[in-house]
Image: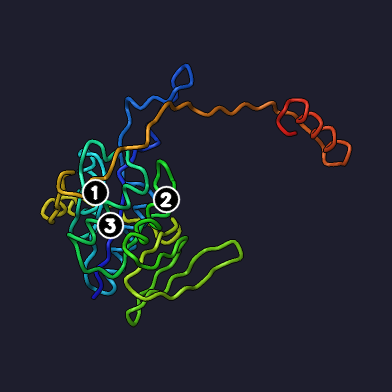
Amino acid sequence: MPTIIACFKWVVDEAYIRRGSSGELDFSSVDYKISDYDRNAIEEAVRLKETLGGSAIAVTVGAPAASKGVKDALSRGTDQAWFAADDTFGHLDSSQTAAILAEIIRSRIGQYDLIICGEGSGDLYAQQVGPRLAENLGIPCISFVQKVTIAENRLIADRKIEEGIEVIASPLPALVTVLPDINIPRIPGVKDTLMAGKKPAVTIKNDELQPAGKVLLQTIGLVASRLERDCEKFGTDDAEIARFVGSLRKKGVIG
């Protein structure tokens, strides 16, 4: 029976971000959530556990406030959780996050068969943590996965590429980064939330880990994007298209 690890990140819920009068982003009323992509990772880990047996383990790195995300992950069907918590961990780059995850998995969890990550996080969407984690652990990595099967001690993954679907077989242990269309994440009920509080969750402090190094990511500023429409109409014949392209050139939209 496999041991499956789902990695997740606690991020700002973009639905609560507001645009200030001078164009800045207002985070004063924001709430937080598990990144949408990581909800798919957790759901797939739990579905595989429900089908094959074994266990599903949630792992995250973040600021102490992300403890709410740990309870959310447990309410979604994972059996236990590991949480590396420090005030500086909310601003790590992808390589630092992957290094901490690798240390937890290697030294604390030990034996595992499959690691599932979201294709990217809901905030930075760098798409780097999964591949870097696999490199740190020395295991195969398959990205853009929309279907996962475990059979005869190997992984079979359907991977979406530009030309269609690529089917890849890999020995275990392995890591996959999954697309949102792999599943529809469940919505935890009241009973699930209550049961989550009884499941084991281990918090690891910064001084219990190998030094992550100086935090290199700094947010200099955030400005809301603007969309302005001229509502210029044009026809479909060659003359109209040429006129419209000429208008775009005059405005500097295209070269």
| Circle 2 residues within 10 Å: few <14, some 14–19, many ≥20 | many
Q: Specify the amino acid type for callout 2.
A: Gly
Looking at the rendering, which quadrant does residue 5 occupy?
A: bottom left
For the point 29% across and 38% down, the residue is 214
| Residue pointed to by mark 3 | 102
Q: Which mark is residue 4?
A: none
Q: Residue at x 26, y 47 (%)?
A: 61
From this viewpoint, which residue is outermost toward the bottom?
Answer: 152
Report the residue that reaches farthest toward the right.
Answer: 239
Picture coordinates of residue 209, whole percent (x, y):
19, 49
Where is residue 216? Give x, y as percent.
35, 37
Residue holding disc 1: 72
Query: In this picture, is 219 found above or below 6?
Result: above
- The quadrant holding residue 90 is top left
Q: Do the residues labelled 3 and 1 touch (CB within 8 Å)?
A: no
Residue picked out by circle 2: 120
**Circle 1 SS class:** helix
Looking at the image, which residue is at 38% across and 56% down? 132
- Vertical position of residue 77 compared to residue 84: above or below: below
Neighbourhood count class around disc 3 (C-alpha, 10 Å): few under 14, some 14–19, many 20 upward = some
Instruction: Give the SS element for disc 2.
Output: loop
- In front of the other: 220 or 196: 220
**110 or 74, which is in the foreground?**
110
Q: Position of residue 71 (x, y in %)?
A: 20, 48
Cα distance, mark 3 to mark 1?
22 Å
Q: Which amino acid type corresponds to the residue marked 1 in the rendered image?
A: Asp
Q: What element carries label 3?
A: helix
For marks 3 and 1, give the one nearer the viewer: 3
Earlier in the chain: of badge 3 and badge 1, it is 1
